[in-house]
Image: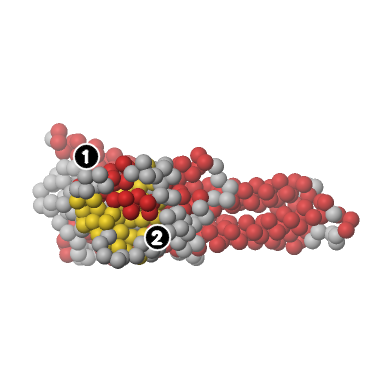
Amino acid sequence: MLATNETIVAIATAVVPQQGSVGIVRLSGTTALEIARYIFHSPGLQRWESHRILYGYIRHPKTQKLIDEALLLIMLSPRSYTREDVVEFHCHGGIMAVQQVLQLCLEAGAKLAQPGEFTLRAFLNGRLDLTQAESINDLVGAKSPQAAQAALMGLQGKLRSLIVQLRADCLDILAEIEARIDFEEDLPPLDIKDITAKIRQLLAQVSEILATANRGELLRSGLKVAIVGRPNVGKSSLLNAWSKCDRAIVTDLPGTTRDVVESQLVVGGIPVQVLDTAGIRETSDKVEKIGVERSLSSAQSADLVLLTIDASVGWTESDADIYTSVQHRPVILVVNKIDLVDNKPQLPGNMTHIVTAAAQNIGIEALEQAILTTIQAGVVKSADMDLAINQRQAAALTKAKISLQQVIEAIDTTLPLDFWTIDLRGAIQALGEVTGEEVTESVLDRIFSRFCIGK
């Protein structure tokens, strides 16, 4: 055994049979370089120095069997991702090469990394704070350019710098109040008006950051949109025009779509899962009936419903019945086949609606704009669109907000200074939870368990 359990190893790239030209095996720990020397042979006079790439061969140290022709990347502490010695074997892609190299590292004494353990070590070693660590996971899982940009801003420390400054301001106020408690006779009276103004300013800043929580959730998980309506109103044509491909079969026959068809789109930077559902009507066909039931189920679980009607038929009792079944969700009325009529049919006056001619690719931009308007009506839009906090951060910031509000209440009700400090400490602790300065081991386990192995 050449290594101890202090060194971890994992495959750091996706492993797909016959796909991918390069596969990376990553080691981090005190004996990472030692293991690399044990299994990697670099011909010639190549120098084993930090931040160099070596060319060579990976061999079984006992049998000398050739495993792969590879590159070795060396990053010595502290100039590495984890601030430990890190080496990476850049092997041929696929399954066999990286699996065999991984096995050699394990036999040499490394232990298999847990999900997110490389990033956890980066956090524990002070390389990243908790907001930056979470941003790495968000960047890996980003479903749109805007989601990637928000994650990148978090990785660059945008949220961290805001929270650190807020926490420092709270500590300054706390120090000023506690000084009056301990040395009341030696210091001038506390400027209560100034203290209150500072706390209100902090409260406003916390509220502004909290306003990005809904947007952050949208960027991460996306929006589920269900297209519903009677048979043959053009739901599948609408999906095909919107997705710019033939995702759904389109015919003149009612009931063509028997099941839910999905498509993944991006609207205004927000990932959107679009569900084209079977036409909703009374039917004796068992298969179609199952499709109708699934359509209603999809509509019930959707974040937004596009209720589609046929402009040449107009608003019918069946459309009204469908609307009644989905009206508890946000609904946009899509008046399709507008190219077949001279005038728009009479519609219910209380519904947001747009007109389309999906078969002619008309009205798609208006549809997307209506979706964005509906989203913004339910999401507090922050002026800082590069910031998007997650649920954990929002929970901690909510605690900080409540604590600051309680400080103001204590001041307004002229409670003793000791009561002010209790709530101020609560705000300081909550802000520390955001960045990881105040965090428990169980919270860390929960956060990093969501990461992929190798990151």
Q: Quadrant of residue 44?
A: bottom left
Other residues around mark 2 within 10 Å, as few (<14) / some (14–19) / many (≥20): many
Residue 350 spot, x, y in % from top left: 38, 54
Closer to the camera in the image, 340 or 78 = 78
Rendered residue at 59%/59% (across/down): 164
The colour style of the image is secondary structure
Q: Which mark is residue 434?
A: none
Q: Tag 1's secondary structure?
A: helix
Closer to the camera in the image, 333 or 133 = 133
Name which of mark 2 and mark 1 comes first in the sequence: 2
Other residues around mark 1 within 10 Å, as few (<14) / some (14–19) / many (≥20): many
Question: Is residue 140 something one can see in this rendering?
Answer: no
Question: Is residue 392 something one can see in this rendering?
Answer: yes
Residue on which the image places disc 2: 75
| Alpha carbon distance from label 2 to label 1 | 58 Å
* Circle 1: residue type: Val
Rendered residue at 46%/41% (across/down): 445
Q: Tag 2's secondary structure?
A: strand
Residue 260 spot, x, y in % from top left: 21, 44
Horizontally, is 43 left or right of 150 in the view?
left
Residue that extends furthest to the right in the rendered view of this protein? 185
Residue 221 spot, x, y in % from top left: 37, 50
Whether the residues at callouts 2 and 1 have beta carbons within 8 Å, the answer is: no
Closer to the camera in the image, 292 or 339 = 292
Residue on which the image places disc 1: 292
Quarter of the picture holding the N terminus: top left
